[in-house]
């Protein structure tokens, strides 16, 4: 079966359509620092508005713990959405309560409402199927049909991604269709050499994909927060850097498997070690076996790859014909730790082949560092989702829409 697309829902004029977007944007002091995911959601929303549907947009933002938390409110997103659509967007102060009910009841054809953060409700991410179904049923009461367009969450078996798609006539939106077109080019006979570059801070999620990615690629370059678990697996001390101690044995397994398969896992040679987490931290470049050999000893923390590593990774990237990159190489939001990410972005703009950047923060990073979207083959809105797609995993949010790999 192939993905059910918007036309499969028939005419949506006058119907209430719930649209699951991934509007999980980076915020600083309540301001959106990169609106790429909001922009990416616009074509589907406009298609529905133009048909005269009543559009009910739902999304998560960040990882609140199943209860309202003002710092994860979607209110700033509602404002940006309204600007980009060029029309008012009613913002509901809750997700399924009286605020949402009033917002939806007030919609006329072609109007748009955005409900408050889905993850303010424990049912959204519950491990219990019945709890997710119950929450999805409350959402489903707001619509006649469901459009799933949050590509960044299709790897999550969550109520608004999976159970809601079962509860209503459902189809994929235009963003999901576009993302899959590009990712297909990375899975079906990618031009070789094929390199995948991994970084970022969702370390346990991303360590999990490596085992299945290894047989598909020629090299795997490891930077960002996950590099320290690899260095620890090689016996190095990593100070107070991000570390998944319980994954060290798994990582040793990956290193052995890569050797068996003849795939290169390329690890950093140097890192930028900081006295603390902050833009005003003191920092020095250290070789990977000297992370604790600074004035700060074991309290020093690695916040970027070093210059020698940036050059090494850039060489691999420029020599590849297909590259997928997810996860910043360092804490690019703080100027002293942005150089590694900038070097990798630059190399990706120079490849002779297809270079894809994936992930909310990775996309934000390349734009914040002065690159434009058209310098890359594609900027995907999903990091974890793309990686799980590339490793060949069955993604619940796609399968429920009829997709089979
Ligand atoms: N060495 C590091 N230590 C701590 N955080 C890091 C490190 N390197 C990168 N990061 C952080 O990783 C975050 C992005 O990670 P992630 O969400 O996994 O990426 P994406 O959204 O692109 O999938 C950024 O906010 C960045 O500051
Ligand atoms: O930012 C996201 O994913 P990404 O960091 O892998 O790109 C998505 O919004 C999914 O968020 P989640 O990883 O909290 O489920």
Image (spheres, grey):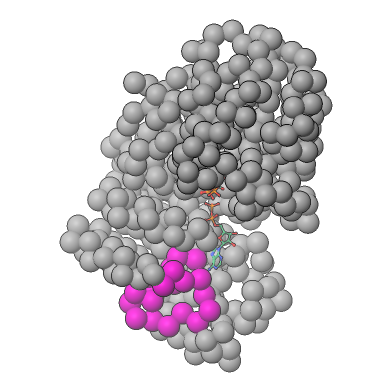
Q: Quadrant of the N terminus?
A: top left
Rendered location of residue 250, percent (x, y): 31, 65
> Residue 43 versus residue 322: which sits nearer the camera?
43
Residue 12 vertical placement versus 283 (above, below): above
Start and end of the magenta stretch?
225-245
Q: Which residue is nearer to you in this view: 317 or 17?
A: 17
Give the residue furthest to the left. 260
Q: Residue at x 37, y 33 (%)?
A: 184
Task: Say whether residue 51 is visible.
Answer: no
Q: Which residue is drawn at the image coordinates 61% and 62% (left, top)? A: 332
Query: Quarter holding the C terminus?
Result: top left
Q: Return the x and y of residue 400 as percentages of the image width and height.
A: 43, 28
The percent coordinates of residue 46 (x first, y second) are 67, 21
Q: Say if 88 sits above or below 382 in the image.
A: above
At horizontal 78% and vertical 38% (from top left) the residue drawn is: 93
Q: Is residue 182 left or right of residue 331?
A: left
Q: Is residue 277 visible?
A: yes
Q: Position of residue 16 (x, y in %)?
A: 66, 17
């Amino acid at each position: 079966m192939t993905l059910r697309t918007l036309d499969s829902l028939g005419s949506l004029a006058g119907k209430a359509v719930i649209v699951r977007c991934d509007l999980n944007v980076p915020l600083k002091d309540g301001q959106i620092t990169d609106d790429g995911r909001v922009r990416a959601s616009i074509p589907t929303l406009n298609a529905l508005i133009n048909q005269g549907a009543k559009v009910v947009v739902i999304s998560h933002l960040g990882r609140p713990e199943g209860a309202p938390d003002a710092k994860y409110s979607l209110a700033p997103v509602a404002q940006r959405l309204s600007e980009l659509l060029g029309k008012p967007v009613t913002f509901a102060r809750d997700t399924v309560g009286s605020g949402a009910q009033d917002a939806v009841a007030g919609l006329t054809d072609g109007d748009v409402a955005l409900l408050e953060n889905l993850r303010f409700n424990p049912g959204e991410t519950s491990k219990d199927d019945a709890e997710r179904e119950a929450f999805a049923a409350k959402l489903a009461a707001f619509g006649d049909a469901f459009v799933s367009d949050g590509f960044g969450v299709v790897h999550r078996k969550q109520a608004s991604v999976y159970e809601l798609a079962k509860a209503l006539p459902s189809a994929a939106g235009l963003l999901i269709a576009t993302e899959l077109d590009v990712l297909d080019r990375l899975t079906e006979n990618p031009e070789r050499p094929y390199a995948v570059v991994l970084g970022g801070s969702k370390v346990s999620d991303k360590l999990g994909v490596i085992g299945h990615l290894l047989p598909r690629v020629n090299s795997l370059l490891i930077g960002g927060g996950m590099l320290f678990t690899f260095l620890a697996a090689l016996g190095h001390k990593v100070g107070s850097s991000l570390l998944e101690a319980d994954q060290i044995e798994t990582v040793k397994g990956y290193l052995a498997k890569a050797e068996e398969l003849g795939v290169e896992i390329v690890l950093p040679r140097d890192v930028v070690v900081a006295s603390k987490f902050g833009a005003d931290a003191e920092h020095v470049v250290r070789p990977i076996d000297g992370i604790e050999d600074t004035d700060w000893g074991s309290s020093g923390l690695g916040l970027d790859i070093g210059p020698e590593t940036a050059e090494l990774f850039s060489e691999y990237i420029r020599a590849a014909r297909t590259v997928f990159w997810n996860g910043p190489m360092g804490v690019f939001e703080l100027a002293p730790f942005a150089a590694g990410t900038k070097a990798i972005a630059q190399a990706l703009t120079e490849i002779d082949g297809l270079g894809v950047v994936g992930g909310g923060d990775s996309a934000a990073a390349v734009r914040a560092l002065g690159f434009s979207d058209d310098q890359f083959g594609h900027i995907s809105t999903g990091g974890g989702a793309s990686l799980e797609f590339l490793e060949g995993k069955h993604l619940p949010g796609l399968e429920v829409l009829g997709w089979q790999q």
